[in-house]
Image: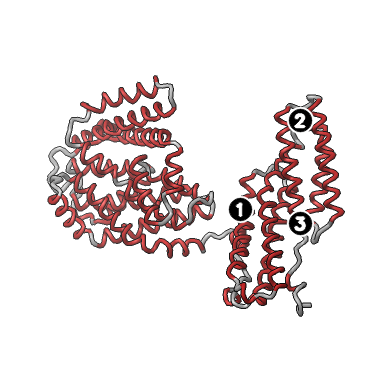
Amino acid sequence: MIASIFQILGGLALFLLAMEMMTDGLKHAAGPQLRHMLSDWTKTPLKGFGTGVLITGIVQSSSAVTVATIGFVNAGLLSLGQSLGVVFGANVGTTMTGWLVSLVGFDIKIEAFAMPLLALGMALRLLSSGHRSRAVGEALAGFALFFLALSLLKDSLGVITEGVDGQGMLGQQYGLPLFVLFGFLATLLTQSSSAALAIILSAAASNLLSLENAAAAVIGANLGTTSTAAIAVLSATANARRLALGHVTFNLVTGAIAVAILPLLLWLVAALARWFELGASPAVSLALFHTLFNVLGAAIMLPFAPRLAYFLGRLFRSKEEDNAEPRYLDDTLVTTPELAVGAVDEEMKRLINLARGLLRVCVDREGLKPGQIQPKSEAALSLNTAINDYIARLRAERMHPSTVDALTQSIRTCRYLVETIALAPALLRLQAARHEPEFAPLRPGLENYLNVLRALIASEGASSETFNDAERTYHQLKSTLLGMVVRRDVPTSSGDRLLDDLSSVRRLSDQWSKSLQWTPATDTLPGEN
């Protein structure tokens, strides 16, 4: 008995290793194609669902797909609604593991093909010179180990359950909640729903669990996948937490429905198994059950994905996201542009202040990385887009020419601010250059330039004197740096890099100075003074 328990643990460890090898190998073999599929094939929640099913079926890891999806959401390539479709699809795609186990794992002599496959995979992994070939070899080796681990699990459980009757060692008297908890804990402890499913299917095939109890355990394993997402986002971004909560919501709703109609689902599974002539294997029935209730859950939840995304979008809001929301743009004023310009003025003031706050952070705080200023940048850009969209909706035929001029100035200023925000990372690089040993002779000049820029950023209105001071300082720095490059005091590559950053900062100061020339329309329109 003790030896069999250690065999089960060893089989489980081998299974987890195999899943990691399969996932990593397939991800690396696919390379940028996975990124392309996720970013381009998810324009609607339904397309996102199909993409989630396909990619998870390929890489055999819903966690990997979910993590990649979170990355795309944070990068702004996917909306929350699109990403929910991908996560729903990943839950269906992960059922492929059950089908692999049930259709291949229990009906043939596994060693007959697993060993040659393992040899082929390791040969590719060790002998191939190409990155993709080595990745394919790793995936093949993982695929072989997957079935060897499955065989070890089944044999070990078979030894334990010799002589057990058809009701299984664990009888019905324990109730379905216990088996749901068993499946949940199996996934929680292994952090792999695939491993939990392999244990459950092996137990069912070995007569350790009845079909109904095993089905309840499969529901629990499906719920357990939410623990991986929850752990992954404990200290993550707001978007990551929203997506994780969407994942939890989907699995809870799906699991609750499956438990509520479990007898009906099992009857339907038996009918479908007969219809498709899949046989009476418990493993096949459970794989079909797992797929059926996940597809049912997706069919119920997908129509509500936009509403769920809207609800989740109101949660875990950061200060930057609140700043990105327009506060004065009232839709009821769209038909009366003369009144709407006042709302635009208020948002323009907020936008300029957001941009000013971003630039101040870039020149005042040491050691910042571009990624750390991204939330502030995105907030300002989002508000900028809202202002432009609002102005585009105003009724042009009812505008006074002076109103048109005032709104044109606001749109022009928005363009200046967009470029200012885009160039902000150059300020970080310029600040970091002060501490590089090769630019030590330039340190006083760089410090002076940053001080002049601080004064320009702090200006409440256009200041030609401060801007001209920044221009003079820029040209002095550029001349000094070019002399250092000619004398080879600094490497040409380093000099070119700093020259590019200086040029970007000069462009930034020019665009910022132009944006400071903006004046509220309410100060210039006739009758407003």
Residue 273: image location, x then y, percent: 15, 50
For the residue carrying disc 3, how many other residues have a C-alpha within 10 Å: few (<14), some (14-19), or many (20+)?
some
* Cα–Cα gap, marks 3 and 2: 35 Å
State which quarter of the image contains the C terminus: bottom right
User: Given contact means CB atoms under 8 Å apart, are the residues at marks 2 and 1 in contact?
Assistant: no
161 left or right of 520 in image:
left
Dot 3 or dot 2, earlier in sequence: 2
Q: Is residue 224 visible?
A: no
Question: In this picture, is 67 found above or below 417?
Answer: above
The label on residue 437 is 2
Q: Amino acid at mark 1?
A: Pro
509 left or right of 398 in image:
right
> Of helix, strand and loop, which one carries label 1?
helix
> Of helix, strand and loop, which one carries label 2?
helix
For the residue carrying disc 2, how many other residues have a C-alpha within 10 Å: few (<14), some (14-19), or many (20+)?
few
> Of helix, strand and loop, which one carries label 3?
helix
Q: Nearer the viewer, residue 304 or 257?
A: 304
Q: Residue at x 28, y 56 (%)?
A: 177
Q: Which residue is mark 3?
A: 514
Dot 1 or dot 3, earlier in sequence: 1
